[in-house]
């Protein structure tokens, strides 16, 4: 199902934020469009969604972009705020968080783990530009091994959450997340389908979405800010799950789907409190 961009802009986005202030060639807009199209295909209205944003490129570019209610969290704390809102909001309201890799997998990782542990109903879209690009292009928690960045001029050799057989999604699965997936920005329709499923999950969902940064990452790793080069570089290193080849960094698709398999956080809290009020005990 296809929609014209103008339809989605008019319905869901604040026109004063279009175009965004992102750098020329930035792939964040592709990720954002995937999320908005998934919302449209689900038939959700502006009032059905509460947006949360964080710090860095992802937070700055998506904050107050969407019409309706939204909030911004301090660095790494958006998940704690969302858990509180989940208790306060009606269950039919959808909480969608657009965050960066540093916010999710760095300073915010403990809060993220507890959101997954409690299976709080929220959809976390991790917009990963492969490092700390808004502060100059330092390597981060998911920077591909060997990549040249502002803080790794000889190649990034430190162990991180996407190197040496590690995958941050393993951590989140172990913490109790009920839906986990990964797509790169160029995955288009497949990514939209996955995000739809993530939003429908009555629990904690996360979609990890690496995207191209021509300004900092590409300039240092590829020696060029030509957006075409970094888009191709990422595409060559991504492959659907089961079709990986030598050099694949990102296996794309639905990584773990246990939708509905665990009690949802706010529902569990409300039911437990009601029981205590009725009986005086658990």
Image (cartoon, rainbow, N blue to C red):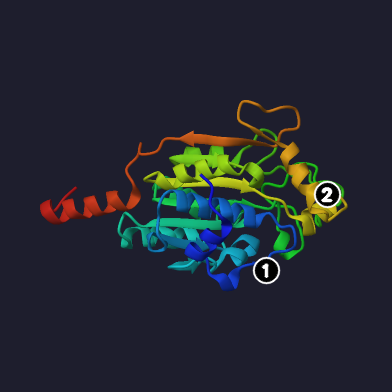
User: Camera-side residue: 75 or 259?
Assistant: 259
Of labels 2 and 1, the one closer to you:
1
Instruction: Give whichever of 55, 210 is nearer the camera.
Output: 210
User: Which residue occupies the foreground of this view, 218 or 186?
Assistant: 186
> At 69% from the left edge and 53% from the top edge, which residue is drawn?
129
Q: Position of residue 266 (x, y in %)?
A: 32, 53
Give residue 261's quadrant in the image: top left
Mark 1 lies on residue: 21
Please report the residue visible at 28 percent of the width from the left and 49 percent of the height from the top.
268
Q: x%, y% of residue 264?
A: 34, 46
Residue 82 in sight in this render: yes
- Residue at the outermost bottom position: 16
Q: Determine the residue positioned at 65% across, 56% down.
A: 28
Q: Secondary structure at mark 1?
A: loop
Residue extending furthest toward the left:
279
Q: Position of residue 86 (x, y in %)?
A: 36, 58
Q: Does residue 233 lie above or below 55 as drawn?
A: above
Q: CA distance from mark 2 to mark 1?
A: 23 Å
Q: Which mark is residue 114?
A: none
Left or right: 170, with 226 as reference point: left
Discs 2, 1 touching: Cβ within 8 Å: no
Disc tally is 2
Label located before the other in sequence (2 or 1)? 1
Q: Is residue 114 visible?
A: no
Where disc 2 sits, the SS reads helix
Alpha-carbon neighbours of circle 2 within 10 Å: few (<14), some, or many (≥20)?
some
Q: Which x, y percent locates residue 237?
A: 73, 37
Callout 1: 10 Å neighbours few (<14), some, many (20+)?
A: few
Q: Quadrant of residue 177?
A: top left
Q: In the depicted view, which residue is nearer to us: 14 or 106? A: 14
Give the side of residue 25 with respect to residue 60, left or right.
Answer: right
Q: Residue beneath label 2, please? A: 221
């Amino acid at each position: 199902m296809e929609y014209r961009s103008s339809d989605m802009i008019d319905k869901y986005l604040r026109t004063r934020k279009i175009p965004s202030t992102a750098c020329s060639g930035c792939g964040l807009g592709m990720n954002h469009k995937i999320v908005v199209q998934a919302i449209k295909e689900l038939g959700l209205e502006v009032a059905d969604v509460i947006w949360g944003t964080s710090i860095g490129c992802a937070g700055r570019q998506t904050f107050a972009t969407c019409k309706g209610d939204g909030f911004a969290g301090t660095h790494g704390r958006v998940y704690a705020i969302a858990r509180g809102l989940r208790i306060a909001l009606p269950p039919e309201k959808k909480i969608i968080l657009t965050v960066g890799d540093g916010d999710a997998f760095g300073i915010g990782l403990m809060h993220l783990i507890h959101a997954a542990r409690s299976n709080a109903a929220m959809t976390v879209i991790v917009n990963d530009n492969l490092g700390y690009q808004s502060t100059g292009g330092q390597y981060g928690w998911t920077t591909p091994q060997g990549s040249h960045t502002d803080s790794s001029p000889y190649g990034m050799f430190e162990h991180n959450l996407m190197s040496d057989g590690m995958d941050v999604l393993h951590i989140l699965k172990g913490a109790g997340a009920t839906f986990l997936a990964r797509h790169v920005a160029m995955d288009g329709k497949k990514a939209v389908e996955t995000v739809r499923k993530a939003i429908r999950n009555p629990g904690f969902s996360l979609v990890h979405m690496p995207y191209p940064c021509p300004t900092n990452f590409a300039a240092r790793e590829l020696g060029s800010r030509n957006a075409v080069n970094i888009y191709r570089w990422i595409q060559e290193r991504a492959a659907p799950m089961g079709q990986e080849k030598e050099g694949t960094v990102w296996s794309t698709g639905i990584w773990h789907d246990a939708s509905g398999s665990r009690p949802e956080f706010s529902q569990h809290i409300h039911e437990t409190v009601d029981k205590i009020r009725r009986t005086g005990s658990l």
